[in-house]
């Protein structure tokens, strides 16, 4: 199926901050160990398989909130079938309001000591929830995260991903002392999060329309708040790649990611964390750059010039306002930001003509962008991940 290409808005409206949730006052001792939030919107083709993969988990001490966001297909009926047969499942039917608003309702009603997420077109690996809960409870961690596979039902193909550096896995870390963590894919659906941490740090989702990048600011806030996080190299979720309706396949929502990073900066500005303030500001800038460049590479070619120009203007304004701590950035990322600010059209031409997925093309791009010094800087950055 061809992908829809929507006209990009170069001057998006200011987004509202993430809402302050009215969390229920729940006794943690009497609550289920974990609440799994399942946002649902017109996924009748995949929903039964998704919910069955949760229902059949070996770990049974969970509640599942099935958050039906005004589906117009049979998704609500499927969800209610599970509710009727299994008391751990509860359906919340609501008018359509988007992914972030829907998950915020789920967070406000969750009763578990921990909270997890399951996308309604994905599938949990057998034993995945038990593995997550065993790890998070063993370390008394604020966050535990496994990995995931890229899954295509036609074939089928299922490719397990290994995103974490070896020196990070299987130990408790403070994410604020490991800036690499902030560059991992948000992927909130392959982890569990202590609900008390979410409540105490006012962590919720930005309620932008649709389903575009809303886990970006949520994941950043959790890493910025957690005192203990554990990563392990075992897959939790089959992450479906062949759902044509998935937001990952839409090119028209690229500016939504800007609102996510604006929300991150607003949230950071409200915090009193002098110990980690500089690290978190740097992490926000670097994560913003990475997300923007990922978008440059994926959107329709005819829209790339206006997008790179908007990035140039944004970073220029951030620099003028003193929001870029150049001394805290590695040389490679600093060079990219400066080149984008100085001549976005030239930067784009280089990226389109030289940059690619292979190591050779990345090296060639580095040389073209800034010579041997840039290449050495890029290599140092890659080794530091």
Image (cartoon, rainbow, N blue to C red):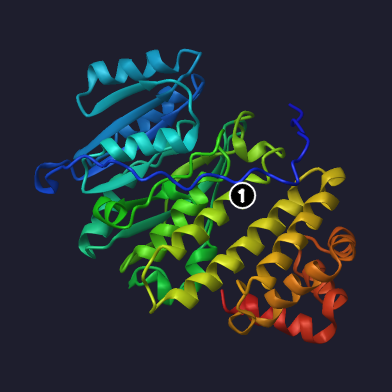
In the image, 310 versus 142, the foreground residue is 310
- Above or below residue 380? Residue 306 is above
Side of 143 relative to 60 (left or right): right
Side of 261 relative to 289 (left or right): left
Side of 1 relative to 64 (left or right): right
For label 1, the residue is 257
Instruction: Give the x, y percent position of residue 209.
Output: 56, 34
Asked where in the image residue 101 lies, by quadrant, the reply is: top left
- Above or below residue 358? Residue 166 is below
In the image, 151 versus 21, the foreground residue is 21
Asked where in the image residue 32 lies, by quadrant, the reply is: top left
Instruction: Give the x, y percent position of residue 27.
Output: 11, 45
- Above or below residue 304? Residue 68 is above
Look at the image and tell me in which quarter the N terminus lies. Answer: top right
Residue beneath the point at 36% across and 33% down: 53
Disc 1 is placed on an element classified as helix
- Above or below residue 84? Residue 225 is below
**Picture mark count:** 1
């Amino acid at each position: 199926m061809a992908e829809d290409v929507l006209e990009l808005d170069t001057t998006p409206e200011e987004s509202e901050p993430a809402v302050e949730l009215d969390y229920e006052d729940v006794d943690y001792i009497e609550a289920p160990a974990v609440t799994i939030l399942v946002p649902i919107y017109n996924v009748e083709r995949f929903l039964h398989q998704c919910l069955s993969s949760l229902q059949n988990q070996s770990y049974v001490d969970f509640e599942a909130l099935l958050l039906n966001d005004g589906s117009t297909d049979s998704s609500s009926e499927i969800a209610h079938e599970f509710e009727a047969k299994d008391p751990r499942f509860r359906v919340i039917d609501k008018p359509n309001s988007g992914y972030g608003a829907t998950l915020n309702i789920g967070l406000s009603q969750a009763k578990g000591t921990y909270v997890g997420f399951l996308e309604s077109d994905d599938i949990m690996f057998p034993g995945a929830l038990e593995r997550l809960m065993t790890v998070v409870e063993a370390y008394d961690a604020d966050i535990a995260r496994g990995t995931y596979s890229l899954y295509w039902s036609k074939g089928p193909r299922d490719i397990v991903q290994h995103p974490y550096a070896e020196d990070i896995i299987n130990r408790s870390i403070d994410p604020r002392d490991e800036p690499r963590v902030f560059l991992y894919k948000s992927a909130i659906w392959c982890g569990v999060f202590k609900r008390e941490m979410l409540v105490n740090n006012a962590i919720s989702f930005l309620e932008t329309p649709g389903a575009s990048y809303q886990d970006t600011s949520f994941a950043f806030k959790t890493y910025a708040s957690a005192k203990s996080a554990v990563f392990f190299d075992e897959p939790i979720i089959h992450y479906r790649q062949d759902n044509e309706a998935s937001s990952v396949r839409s090119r028209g929502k690229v500016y939504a990611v800007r609102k996510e990073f604006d929300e991150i900066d607003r949230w950071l500005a409200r915090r009193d964390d002098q110990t980690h303030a500089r690290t978190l500001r740097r992490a926000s800038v670097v994560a913003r750059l990475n997300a923007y460049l990922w978008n440059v590479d994926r959107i329709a070619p005819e829209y790339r010039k206006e997008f790179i120009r908007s990035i140039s203007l944004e970073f220029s304004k951030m620099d003028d306002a003193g929001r870029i701590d150049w001394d805290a950035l590695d040389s490679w990322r600093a060079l990219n930001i400066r080149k984008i600010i100085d001549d976005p059209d030239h930067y784009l031409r280089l990226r389109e003509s030289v940059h690619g997925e292979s190591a050779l093309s990345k090296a060639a791009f580095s040389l073209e962008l800034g010579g041997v010094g840039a290449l050495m800087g890029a290599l140092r950055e890659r080794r530091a991940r």
